[in-house]
Image (cartoon, rainbow, N blue to C red):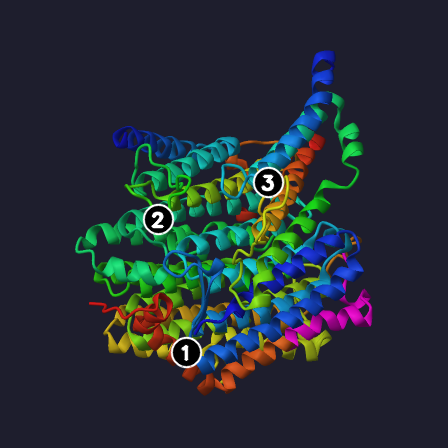
Amino acid sequence: MKSLLFKTASDYLLPLLLLFSVFMLLRGHYEPGGGFVGGLMAAIAFLIHSFAHGLKETRNIIRINPGMLMPIGLLLTLLAGIAPWLIGQPFLTGLWFEEPFRFVGVVGTALLFDIGVYLVVIGATLTIMFSITETV
Amino acid sequence: MEILLIIIIGLLHAGGLYMLLRRSMFKIIIGLILLGNGANLLIFLLGRLVKGHPPVLPDGAKIFAEIYADPLPQAVILTAIVIGFGLQSFAIILIKTVFKVLETDDLDELNSTDEEI
Amino acid sequence: MNNILVIAPILLQLFAGTILLFFWTKTQIQKVLSILFSFLSLGLGIWLFLLTWKDGIQFTHAGNWAAPFGISFVADLLSATLVLIASISGLAVSIFSVGTMREERLKFGFFPIMHFLLMGLSGAFLAGDMFNLYVWFEVVIISSFVLLTLGSTKSQLEGAIKYVSLNLLASSLFLIGIGFVYGLTGSLNFADVAVKLSAISNRGIINVTAGIFLVSFGIKSAIFPMYFWLPASYHTPPPAVSAIFGGLLTKLGVYALVRTFTLMFGGDEFLGIMLSIIAALTILSGGLGALLQKNLSKAFGYLIICHIGFMVAGLGMFTEVAILGTVFYLFHDIIVKTNLFMVAGLVLKINGTQDISKLGGMYKSYPLISILLSIPLFSLVGIPPLSGFWPKIFLIQGGLASEDYFLIAFIVLGSFLTLWVVAKIWAEVFWKNAENLPVKASGLYFNQMSKANQSMVIIPIIFLSIVSLYIGFAAENIYVLSEKIAADLMNPQNYIETILGIKTILP
């Protein structure tokens, strides 16, 4: 799409949306939000960028192949899942640090799980969308 | 509210089945999407509707004082939507590839695997 | 018994798939890792089976939320055995695909997706919760979609359209059924649902729910009116993919039928009659369809349908002996059908075609391989000491006990049809004089393969033949196992009490 307005807007929207997606990810455990929504939002940010600048440009700023985000995310979720095994608790039991961290809030395995989901969702959505775009 | 939902679910299922029975590949996918949405709404309805009481504890409270909405259908539907999203996007890419390779949208022409004995 | 490691077989496959995703284009590493992980999962399968055999039902509640509120993973004897058998099949297919899969198809991620498929299968066998079962079903079907369309040839895409749309329909129906069950009982845990459903006096609405599940699982397991997608799609992908589909996917539907129709909807007269009629027609249409086919894989596809009928027949009779037969047949069938499609793949690799009328002379040119291939073929028929014989005996015994002479007639007929098909295949492919087949330039023939690759094709067939010989010759062990499973399935009291942790009285 050759529109100067859209191009300029997407330049500003990309960092803002990415920041907002991280915000969504972090507030996710007790309030609406979470890894899935955050991941979708981040994927949409990249999609808007690719609409405005073309796929090649977007691939350049992501740098790694978005498909690679999926195994990384899956490993993180798996790690979050089996961490409770170390203290003899069942799969996926939530473990938490006592004290909340600054900016981030309470940190636990659920956050690790959410980060994993976030990466998988970005990877999967971008892979699907990019492959649809490329085959048109 | 229940009556309205029941009508919508009925319409979604009817529309989905009608589309499934068409000959065009594309319409079958639309039918499956409608059917999936109908199923999700059905779970929502059968999990009992509660108005204005989300299953979120107010600050400081330890237990729910009044009746509250069942969170489980919501979790189930969310999961089903995500799964449906994945399956449907696969199906859409598939019909696109099929259309490109076979250059037809008509299911009647997709029977070479059945005919060769 | 509470055991947090019950889900280890699932997680191992997830880990395997994830690690293999990192080596997306490096197929050599993928081959080695896949076989390695398959051996590990076989080890885990044996461990879980022995544990369940010794200590009874193993379970864990994910996230430490007790049943019926959380998601339970339950390994009773049936689940543990199926996980073990799935890992045996998985190992065989993994080795077989190293030998036969083309490099360009491996580059599209065959191995990681195969491991995700196996993860979904172990998950579905271990799920103790209806919605969890749905999620694992979806994991299985989405992996199978990818495996089916890998390579995107014309016939594959045509088959895939039918397979994908019918399976999506089945999933929607499954979801609708889950909605009904949740509306009726307010729970999704198998054990809890079983208790609460038995307290509902309006049997009509339960039968409707059961009917929805029957259609949904019926599409997946290819029973009578819903089987058309199977012969249209199963012969299209590469042989390694067909092997894992033919061996395990339809059996997942049968497992779901066995689980729900014993635990939740068991013993209803109307459903029993319904299942019996469907079983008879499934046997008939599968057997007759197989007779007609000239393509080897397609004939085997119809035989899958025919033999699904045997298992559903046992479920329809619903006596302990008949369920024993069903379970026994399930174990035998997974191994033999996986092997059968690998046999079809080997025939294709040797001759370059699967057309029965053109094939011939295999016995003359490859006598040793032919004798090896006779083991799975005749196990399938059930020539007495081989593995297909014993479960049919129990099915017929069950039929005699419940006086279902009509079903017995169909089981005998189905066996004859199978014998006819296999005899025809044996005569045409192995004994008839060879024709000069046109040599295809693109295909890699068996005698052009390196020695290592040749053994990679033969070893899994030998391995599964040994397993099916074991099932045949050591039938008393499998009998004891199946008897115990059937007793557990018919009296789910112990299952329910173990999962819920409370004493309950079923009417």
Residue C441 is situated, as x and y percent measured from the top left of the image, at 80, 53
Q: Quadrant of the C terminus of chain C?
A: bottom left
Residue A39, compared with residue C34, is above or below; it is above
Q: SS of the residue at dot 3?
A: helix
Residue A106, compared with residue C15, is above or below; it is above
The residue beneath circle 2 is C177
Q: SS of the residue at dot 2?
A: helix
Q: Are marks 1 and 2 in contact (CB under 8 Å)?
A: no
Picture disc at residue C119: none
Residue B84 is situated, as x and y percent measured from the top left of the image, at 50, 41
Left or right of C58? Residue C294 is right
Q: Please state which of the two labelled residues, at mark 3 or mark 1, is closer to the viewer.
A: 3
Q: Quadrant of the N terminus of chain C?
A: bottom left
The chain ID associated with circle 1 is: C
| The quarter of the displayed image where residue C102 is located | bottom right
Check residue B76 for magenta coloring.
Answer: no
The residue beneath circle 1 is C482
Span highlighted in magenta in the image: C443-462
Q: SS of the residue at dot 1?
A: helix
Give the residue drawn at x 61%, y 75%. Answer: C43
The residue beneath circle 3 is A26
Residue C456 is situated, as x and y percent measured from the top left of the image, at 73, 70
The crowd level at tag 3 (other Cα within 10 Å; few <14, some 14-19, many 20+) is many
The chain ID associated with circle 3 is: A
> Label 1 vs label 2: CA separation?
29 Å
The crowd level at tag 2 (other Cα within 10 Å; few <14, some 14-19, many 20+) is many
Tag 2: amino acid: Gly
Answer with mark 1 or mark 2, whichever residue precedes in sequence.
2
> Label 2 vs label 3: CA separation?
36 Å
Check residue C452 for magenta coloring.
Answer: yes
